[in-house]
Amino acid sequence: MKKLINEPADVVSEALLGIEAAHPELKIDHASKVIYRGDAPVSGKVALISGGGSGHEPLHGGFVGPGMLDAACAGEMFTSPVPEQMLTATKAVDGGAGVVHIVKNYTGDVMNFEMAAELAAAEAGIDVVSVVTDDDVAVQDSLYTAGRRGVGVTVILEKIVGAAAEQGRPLAEVADIAKLVNANGRSMGMALTSCTVPAAGKPTFELAEDEMEIGIGIHGEPGRRRVPLAPAKEIAEMLVEPILSDLPFTSGDPVIAFVNGMGGTPLIELYLMYNEVARILGGHGVGIARSLVGPYITSLEMAGCSVTLVKATDDLLALWDAPVNTPALRWGV
Amino acid sequence: MKKLINEPADVVSEALLGIEAAHPELKIDHASKVIYRGDAPVSGKVALISGGGSGHEPLHGGFVGPGMLDAACAGEMFTSPVPEQMLTATKAVDGGAGVVHIVKNYTGDVMNFEMAAELAAAEAGIDVVSVVTDDDVAVQDSLYTAGRRGVGVTVILEKIVGAAAEQGRPLAEVADIAKLVNANGRSMGMALTSCTVPAAGKPTFELAEDEMEIGIGIHGEPGRRRVPLAPAKEIAEMLVEPILSDLPFTSGDPVIAFVNGMGGTPLIELYLMYNEVARILGGHGVGIARSLVGPYITSLEMAGCSVTLVKATDDLLALWDAPVNTPALRWGV
Amino acid sequence: MSETATLSGLNAWVREFAALVDEHKEELTRLDSAIGDGDHGINMERGMAAVLAALDGAETPSSAALLKNVGMTLVSAVGGASGPLYGTFFLRLASACGEVTEVDADTFAKAVRAGLDGIVARGKAESGDKTMYDALAPAADALDEALAGGSSLRAALEAAADAAEAGRDATSPMPARKGRASYLGERSVGHQDPGATSAALLFRAAASVLG
Amino acid sequence: MSETATLSGLNAWVREFAALVDEHKEELTRLDSAIGDGDHGINMERGMAAVLAALDGAETPSSAALLKNVGMTLVSAVGGASGPLYGTFFLRLASACGEVTEVDADTFAKAVRAGLDGIVARGKAESGDKTMYDALAPAADALDEALAGGSSLRAALEAAADAAEAGRDATSPMPARKGRASYLGERSVGHQDPGATSAALLFRAAASVLG
Ligand SMILES: Nc1ncnc2c1ncn2[C@@H]1O[C@H](COP(=O)(O)OP(=O)(O)O)[C@@H](O)[C@H]1O
Ligand SMILES: Nc1ncnc2c1ncn2[C@@H]1O[C@H](COP(=O)(O)OP(=O)(O)O)[C@@H](O)[C@H]1O
Ligand SMILES: [Mg+2]
Ligand SMILES: [Mg+2]
Ligand SMILES: [Mg+2]
Ligand SMILES: [Mg+2]
């Protein structure tokens, strides 16, 4: 295992020290492993909390700041945070207008956030609305699965919903926008290599030099199928076509197109993939209104990428364009 | 070789198509492989051009835009661009106030930029000042080397000098600021893994599971020495101490601290490294005035990092803080 | 042979479970790597180490106090799917055992049933979903049945542990329908469920020290 | 045996060099991987392929026209260190040969010397720096010496190619002092210089088709 770390057990807490040192505009609760925007709680503003296992950086801590999240709870590597963290965060950021929990749809995340919301209601009487993201078309949403995983759409959602909250919109509206973005978004990912959880010390799965996994999530887990390595053109089709056939795009609908790196793939390859994605979308008459290219929801050092498309409305685009000031996304300020 | 590409020979040109699709605010000359800010030439403004081999993204194309570069010339993978590219770019961006070429100190880059500058003077009578970055303390700057390599300082320099040019400062002053940043900056890098140039198809060098390279550049070349894998704490010392002993920091001097990822290292590890770097600097009484953490000058999918420190003045810090609007660095707008 | 679960017996059970988890940490992680995210052993080990540390410093004068401490510690130290599930199991066990220092076999069996119900309430697992439920439910059934047939607590726990292990083994051919493994669909077939494997350890620990 | 370098001879030389580069592409890249950035074979192959393509479509009625085309194409297709260096070599060769269709042996030798001077002007290499200079300079010397001693152009080019190969081999024990390999310091010792290796191919190509 080759990593820039000290003890595997200390990776998350030491990275939080680094985030604190690099971003004095944030506040870090090291005991609870929660990252706060510096001016939290913002009175009268709906507060946004997300969180999840670590190893997906910049998600979620890199999205804390004005115009996006109020707090992010960092779990152990690839393991959802525990209810206490979300409870602490919920109490700390509540500005009186209620709190939205943004939860990626994994059994563990959903259960831990659920317990936190129960406790927040019982202990502190705080209004919490949970929004679960489940955009991964690689997973069939049926009785036979835990439902679709929450992946790339989470990034787009946190930005857009963060802007809505920043504008002072009320809890119900903010939650509705979150649900709309999730309903309008679909993703699909692939891996060229596996990744290694520091405490495990070896790759979660093995892939031969001529193989890749299609339909992976973001936890170094194997995907839906293992296929021979293919050119970028074909990989792009394997990712985009299932999205388009799942989401009823009408020709001409504007989308936010997001090509995400899994952590170990260089930017030049992501731009090359973006070109393929844009080409395929053009062929379907889907217009790209906004784009995002880079490693934003990662799986440690995994090589690979995912594609997320979100069907946008004018309101959603305006919220996307609104100012944001976080370590990983910043514009307008 | 596992990469998200089509033909190895087409990687650079296809990535440029992706950059064009994702960033409509830029202009791309595909024949010359030059990326321009959309409103170039900006009349009366000193123009900044950089360029170099591809495979270091976001450097340099990701730094084109208001407040930073006017143009970036993309060479083949790890191979400096050719004089024609810089000549074309120089003519295209000259707004009458002269042009600064920012050249990383590699024999090939220096010679190709030199030929371009000669041609620009001869053919078009354009005032070109070349500034060579040579900040890599892993290389001894002596008669026995080609001089220090230009690495991380190039990123900081392009931001700061871009701001100076945007403010309308004259050519000589802009060039002086560039030289000052370079003189005040030092870097040192390391690799956990090698990387693969697509056309070569296999890693440039091989590293055992328990080895790392200290003192690497950004071209997948071996470093100064190969040592056993070590904890992040020790790696940070191996990188920071040679910088501090080379640059005459006075205790209390504010620095811009930059922990850069080589392309395949996840952000969580970079923040962990940043913590170690900040701790060591604290021990030396060096105050961090600004910071940058992320993969900004990379070596394809290499795992590893580099540390850059730039001793700052108030003017340099103000220029660092000035608005910038590029694909990879954006704030204040 | 004691017919009750004493406070020290419950204590020994928790410690024995921690020891077995520690011993099988790699196996649990390996199983989770095949069909999950490769952290089940790490999660359980972190959780049980936290439990041991918590118990060392705590006053736990009753079964409820002891088991509640275990449950709370698991909820706040594990995360993931197994944290809330095992945590809820012990919290329900605590309520069902009550503020006593000794519970009889029937009470213990009812407490186990309550714990199982808690897991279902949180995770909505059904039989055949390929989860810890598939080891825990047969174990609870075997415990009830053996006690009803007149077995001693120890013998009934033996039967329960055997049933848990049979249930664990039976998860192999199942396609997963809950948790991360469900994403793999048919690709999960042929792999034993990690959570069912740790659940079998829980009952094996009980059989070797309780009653 | 012709005592001159004709236009078609120069043409054949360039084509033969391209063929040798193509043949040794992997070797050049492997050598550059050891002490550089692993692209010398790729660079030279790209450059010479561009040269062949450029020559196919071009009118090159004189030695100068031909060699200038080669030089310009290398400068604009190769990049890196070798592009400007080989480019400059051919551009200087072009000027020194002039607008003729045939150059005699002495003129050719002077042109080679001019090319070498151009490389030094661009790259500031000295003997022993472990660069292409260490193959080219002995070759130019051997060429002069053989012609002064009365050899035919062909024989002199044989001597030059032998000298280039000896110079190339002699780069192995040197620590590099120019180019990327210089960053490695002592670690570059024991590796043959890639640029000296391609330079030896240039003279081997000349020896086999020119004169
Ligand atoms: N809904 C559920 N109900 C019961 N058990 C579940 C459920 N989902 C997952 N599990 C159990 O949890 C185990 C995985 O635990 P663990 O790996 O620690 O958590 P995570 O899946 O969050 O990484 C699975 O093997 C399975 O037995
Ligand atoms: N200053 C110099 N003078 C002469 N030759 C040089 C000089 N620097 C480098 N070279 C030659 O260039 C070769 C490397 O060429 P190449 O790999 O194509 O370019 P790059 O080093 O830019 O990747 C070296 O092997 C060496 O022979
Ligand atoms: Mg997990
Ligand atoms: Mg090169
Ligand atoms: Mg798991
Ligand atoms: Mg090279």
Image (spheres, coloured by chain):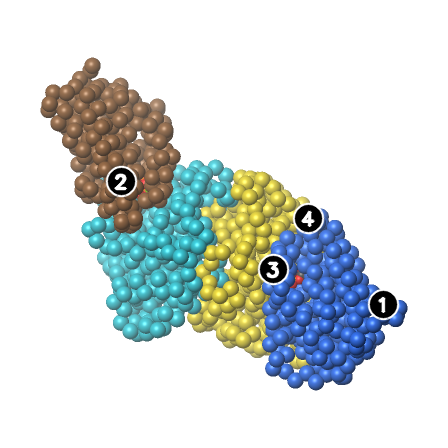
Chain colours: A yellow, B cyan, C blue, D brown
- Residue named by callout 2: D172
Within the image, what quadrant is residue A230 found in? Answer: top right
Residue A23 shown left or right of residue D11 in the figure: right
Tell us which disc is closer to us: 3 or 2: 3
Helix, strand or loop at mark 3 = helix
Have a look at marks 1 and 3 and say if they share a chain. Answer: yes
- Residue C187 disc label: 4
Q: Amino acid at mark 2?
A: Ser
Q: Is residue B270 above or below residue C91?
A: above
Cα separation between marks 1 and 4: 36 Å
Chain letter for mark 2: D
Q: Mark 1 sits on what residue?
A: C146
Residue B247, horizontal then vertical, whole percent:
27, 64
Q: CA distance from mark 2 to mark 1?
A: 82 Å
Give the label, 4 or 2, closer to the camera.
2
Q: Are marks 3 and 2 in contact (CB under 8 Å)?
A: no
Residue at x-position 34% and y-position 41%: D32
